[in-house]
Amino acid sequence: MSKNGLWYPGAVDPHRRAELRSLAYHRAIAARIAHDPAIVERARARVATWQRTGQTHPEWTAVWARLLAQPVGELCAAIVDESEAMTAARQSSPFAGAISARDRWDLWRRVDELPPSRSMDR
C-alpha cells in the first residue's frame, strides 16, 4: 500500500489486472450502449471485417457475432459476465476504441487502486 492508502498496481498479478481492466471497460461499454446504439453497430462492422479478413481467430469472431446478434439487454449482460468464457472473449473485443483514451485510463487507474483481494464488484 502506498502512503496515500492506494494499492500499488504491482500488488495484483498482471494477468488478473488486465482481466479486471477489461471487465471495467466492458461495464462502461454496457452502460453506454443504451444511450449510444452506434457502439453496437461499430462492433458489428468490426466483426464483419474480422469475418472477411480472418484478422481474428474464427472462434472469437463467431463468439462475438453471436453475442452482437442478441437483443441489447442480453448483449450488455453477456459482455460483463465474469465467466471464464467471457473473460477469454473480452481479450478479442470488437469494442476497442468505443471509449476515449482519457476515460479508459481513468477506468484503469481505478482498477489499479483496488486492494488486491477485491474484485470489480459493482
Image (spheres, rainbow, N blue to C red):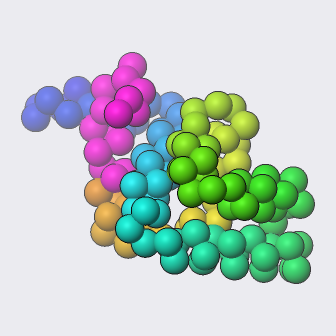
User: Which of these two is toward me, 68 or 98?
Assistant: 68
User: Which of these two is toward me, 57 or 4?
Assistant: 57
Q: Quadrant for the C terminus, please.
A: top left
Relative vertical location of residue 68 with respect to residue 10 in this rendering, above or below? below
Q: Is residue 3 visible?
A: yes
Name the side, left or right, on which 55 lies relative to 34: right
Secondary structure mainly formed by the magenta segment: loop
Q: Residue furthest left?
A: 4
Name the side, left or right, on which 29 lies relative to 54: left
Number of on-image labels: 0
User: Which of these two is toward me, 14 or 118?
Assistant: 118
Q: Is residue 79 visible?
A: no
Relative vertical location of residue 76 with respect to residue 121 in this rendering, above or below? below
Residue 109 within the magenta-colored segment of the rendering? yes
- In the image, residue 97 lies at what x, y percent? 50, 73
Identity of the residue drawn at 23% across and 27% down: 1
Relative vertical location of residue 76 with respect to residue 61 in this rendering, above or below? above
- In the image, residue 75 lies at what x, y percent? 60, 52
Identity of the residue drawn at 64% across and 31% down: 83
Q: Residue furthest top?
A: 117
Residue stretch in magenta? 107-122
**Location of residue 71 (image quadrant):** bottom right
Identity of the residue drawn at 74% across and 71% down: 47
- In the image, residue 81 lies at what x, y percent? 58, 37
**Location of residue 2 (image quadrant):** top left
User: Which of these two is toward me, 10 or 79?
Assistant: 79
Residue 39 within the magenta-colored segment of the rendering? no
- In the image, residue 68 lies at what x, y percent? 68, 61
Relative vertical location of residue 79 with respect to residue 35 in this rendering, above or below? above
Identity of the residue drawn at 84% across and 58% down: 62
Name the side, left or right, on which 117 lies relative to 109: right
